[in-house]
Amino acid sequence: MAHMLIIGGGLAGGTAAQTLREEGFDGDVTIVAAENHPPYQRPPLSKGYLGGKEGSDAVILHSAPWYAEHGIQLIAGVAATGLDVAAHAVDLADGSRLEYDAVLLATGAQPRMVPLPGHNLPGVMTLRRLDDSDRLASELRGGGRRLVVIGAGWIGMEVAATARELGNEVAILERDAVPLAAALGSRMGEVFARLHREHGVDLRTSVGVERIIGGRQAEGVVVGGEVIPADMVLVGVGAAPDTALAEAAGLETLNGVLTDASLRTSAPDVFAAGDVANAFHPVLQRHLRSEHWANALNAGKVAARSMLGQPASFDDIPYFYTDQYDLGMELSGYAPLMTDAEVVVRGDLQRREFVAFWMDQGRVVAGMNVNVWDVNDTVQQLIRSGERIDPARLSDPGLPLEDLLS
Ligand SMILES: Cc1cc2nc3c(=O)[nH]c(=O)nc-3n(C[C@H](O)[C@H](O)[C@H](O)COP(=O)(O)OP(=O)(O)OC[C@H]3O[C@@H](n4cnc5c(N)ncnc54)[C@H](O)[C@@H]3O)c2cc1C
């Protein structure tokens, strides 16, 4: 009987296993997950779950019995240590060896740590895993703590918002002049800077962190000779794709595991999806690696179909969302095309109710709706159409967005 093997118990791996069954595959399916949890999704770890508004059911995709009921073998708490592409086999940390007909690498990404003096002190942490979120929650839920966040990226900003809502003091230290400027540009980054400052965050930009100080525990972060006191330090400076298995097996990697549009890697019967995959995007005609929830979800489905030998191609427009305080945002678009694009705004920036469009040579390449809902499908249609659109019409809130679609 054919055996489909999935390495990684995140959203991509969990979704791929579910899709295999939904597609009617009745052979063997195994998930090998290094963490001691059934497959889970991460967005709530910095938001609702961290803040106590959501329970673990918002995080875990399916409880353990679901896997047994669907004939999926879940090996949790055991890492895959080797991939032997010639033998079509994977070695596990418990000494066992699993042969496969097709294998999916869904190993995600690992958070980066800053190489600063003091980064090993207790109380300095990154946030990636459920266990990290539990640890952070145990510190922040009671309020009255001082949290210093190094790096004003999405995760740092989301944790800052949750920590403030729980009644903690928060400082964010950012190297760039504007938070999120690398992702959104300065004008849109400022929207988030203002949001946090209005909620009492001590957001410091253009600063270089010198070291983390403390004795038994982190007690502060030094910036420009000044000590910012801290009970907890969260390092949020991005993540690197977890390509260890793929590299050791000799697969082609470059900022992730390289795949074609069907998520097939350079090795026979080996596929990759989610944060770890740098997949060829058929519309963009270049490789694209996305570290987003929707990418893991939808690529997991496509990878499963490819593993079954079905024709499948992953051509989604990258989609991302965030929730911070009373701001909800969705962003669809192609990050590589946003850098030099002109930003056109429809709505009210000050009230944080608007849609921003990134225009490249008159065409919409990305769109971000902030506290405006039910428009993201249309934003995606505008991007997909590839048509030139008059910026004056785009920015006119009196003109329904749908009317811009010809
Ligand atoms: C705190 C947080 C908040 C986020 N919020 C948002 C959000 O609001 N919106 C959004 O769009 N995206 C968000 N993201 C990003 C999104 O969660 C990721 O893109 C998504 O988790 C990627 O899923 P994945 O399955 O590819 O990888 P992962 O979720 O990282 O899962 C990979 C799993 O593989 C395991 N693994 C690695 N190596 C091995 C091995 N050798 N053997 C066995 N198992 C292995 C890892 O332990 C891990 O559990 C957030 C991420 C984090 C960390």
Image: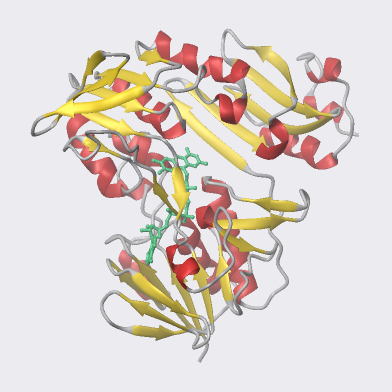
Q: Residue at x 32, y 64 (%)?
A: 34
Q: Nearer the viewer, residue 74 or 68?
A: 74
Q: Most extreme residue toward the bottom, as rendered?
A: 1
Q: Residue at x 17, y 26 (%)?
A: 142
72 over 115 or under it: above or below: below
267 over 143 or under it: above or below: below
Q: Nearer the viewer, residue 98 or 392?
A: 98
Query: Where's residue 194, x and y in %?
Result: 48, 11
Tally of marks: 0
Where on the picture, by quarter, is residue 238?
A: top left
Where on the picture, by quarter, is residue 156?
A: top left
Q: Residue at x 54, y 56 (%)?
A: 256
Query: Where's residue 287, x and y in %?
Result: 68, 53
On the rendered image, what quadrant is the C terminus found in?
A: top right
Q: Is residue 381 left or right of residue 249?
A: right
175 over 307 or under it: above or below: above
Is residue 181 in view?
Answer: yes
Query: Where's residue 386, x and y in %?
Result: 85, 39
Q: Is residue 400 left or right of residue 19?
A: right
Q: Residue at x 40, y 46 (%)?
A: 42
Q: Nearer the viewer, residue 138 or 90?
A: 90
Q: How is the image coloured?
A: secondary structure
Is residue 162 in view?
Answer: no
Q: Is residue 123 left or right of residue 260?
A: left
Where on the picture, by quarter, is residue 260?
A: bottom right
Query: Where's residue 391, x and y in %?
Result: 83, 19
Q: Most extreme residue toward the left, as rendered?
A: 216
